[in-house]
Structure formats: C-alpha cells, structure tokens
Amino acid sequence: LLLSAAGILAQPANNNCANAIFLDDVSSWCSNSAAYTNINATDSGINPTCFPNNSLDVWFAFTAEATTVNVSVTGAVSINAGGTLENPQFSLYSGDCSNLTQVECANDPIGDNTIGAFASNLDIGATYYIQVSGRLGATGTFKLCVNNFNQAQAPSGDCSSAVVLCDKDPFTVDYVVGEGGNPNEIFDEGCGCGIVEDNSSWYKWTCEVSGPLTFTLTPLNPSDDLDFVVFELPNGVNDCSDKTPLRCMASGE
C-alpha cells in the first residue's frame, strides 16, 4: 500500500527546469493528447510576468533551428481535447536554468482551455525552455505543440498580392483578418463549396513536377473553422485573371 501511494503521488519527471524534457524535432511538432501532465508537480519558484500566482509547473527544452516559434498548450477543450488541464499557461525562456530570461508568456484567463503564442528573433543554435502550468493551481494532462520555423511574409487578403512560397517548409500564421481589397475573389469563381471570403490569406507557388498535391491546414485553436480553395493560374503566378478552381473544402464537408 505504501508503494502504491508513493507511485500515485510521484512528481512528473520534468518537475523542474534542470530536468526539462528535451524536444528533438520541433518543426511542426505536436505531442499526443494527454501526453504530459502537471499533476503532482511542485512550484519551481520561477514566476513569469503573466502568471497570476505561483504555479505547479513542468518544463521542456528545445534547440532553435529557425528564428520563429509558435508554442501551444491544449487541455480540456470541447473539440479534439488535448487533456484535462483547464486554463493552461506557459512561459518561454532563453538562457540556462540558473539564469533564465523571459522571451514570451501567455495564459488562458477565460476558460478556452487552450493557449498559444509566437516568439521571433530566436538565436539559431540556442536552447530555449518552456514552462507549463495551469492558472491558480490548476492541474491536469495536456497536449503540447511547438513549431520552430522561419516566418513567411505576412499574409495578404488578395490573390494579386499573395505571398509566394519558395519551398515546402511548414510555417504558422498567427492571425488573419479581413477579406482584402476584393472580397469577391472566391465567390466570382463559383467554387461550389459555399465559401464566402472572410479573414482570407492567399499563397502562390509554382509546381516543380506534375502529380497529386497534398497539404495540411491545422488551426491553432482546435475549434476554429478553416476553409480553402486551390486555384490554377494558367497565365502564370503573377496573373490571377483567369484562375480556375481545382479543389475546395468548407469545414465539415
């Protein structure tokens, strides 16, 4: 009985900065749901600016291979739950465990049970630390996502000024807003999915070889609604006048 109780109360292996779990590959990486927990964690005594009180925290680390990172922690959301943690919060640090410098901090004060944030100007080759906990002593399991990437140009709401993609590296867009100067670019083409252009983002690329195309769009908030249309530009990447819809999807279809 004593051994069983000790096992139940065991602290997470990454209970402090010195024992942070090292994440080897943080290019569009996500853990499984409920992969990590701060249940039975203790307060490290390191309290970033956005945490309202001392926290029961656990730690992760990674080496930057690009200049921008997006970190998200997902707990008890209603769709695609990442775990049981409510009101997650996290802080990102540079330096080492004896001399940490806060780079970014984010918390969920309204009960979304998921939180994410971006940090830029990372030093390639440097180690960064992620401290995860729940507001006001909340504990539970959670899913952690980290995407370390070189930021693409800010998104455009119009085909004519779309961002040109030069490679197939994954990237994250922190937000999109508005429908650009022409709000009817999708409607005019009759794509057949019932999509109305709103908060749109346009990207262009030139196919290197003929064949099938696959891509993945992952919302930062699991409950967000993402739609898409793929067009062919028969007159070249700089001419949107005769664009032809090839494939579209409205979420849920």
Image: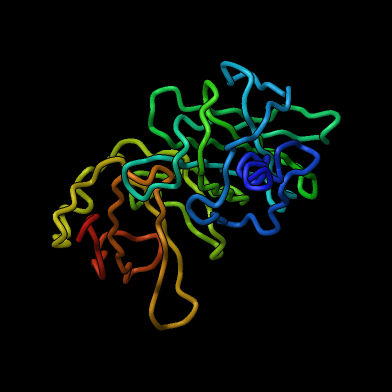
Task: Decide which of 145, 150 is in the foreground and name it.
Answer: 145
- Relative to residue 176, is residue 206 depicted above or below? below
Q: Is residue 119 above or below residue 245?
A: above
Pick whichever, 161 or 121, lies toward us: 121
Look at the image and tell me in which quarter the C terminus lies. bottom left
142 vs 9, left or right, is: left
Farthest residue, direction right: 98
Q: Whole-percent x and y of residue 88? A: 50, 32
The residue shown at (68%, 26%) is: 43
Q: Is residue 60 left or right of residue 189?
A: right
Instruction: Give the residue at x 42% y 62%.
Output: 216
Check the image and report above or below for 181 versus 247.
Answer: above
Give the mark count. Answer: 0
Residue farthest toward the top in the current orientation of the protein: 52
Q: Residue at x 40, y 60 (%)?
A: 238
Q: Quadrant of residue 42?
A: top right
Residue 47 location (% of width, % of height):
68, 21
**Side (left or right) of 78 relative to 11:** left
Q: In the depicted view, which residue is nearer to us: 143 or 242?
A: 143
Residue found at x 31% / y 64%: 230
Residue 199 position within the rendered picture, expressed as x and y whole percent measured from the top left: 31, 40
The image quadrant of residue 177 is top left
Instruction: Tell which residue pokes out farthest to the front in this image.
Output: 1
Q: Quadrant of the N terminus?
A: top right
Colour setting: rainbow
Residue 52 percent location from the top left of the image: 56, 16
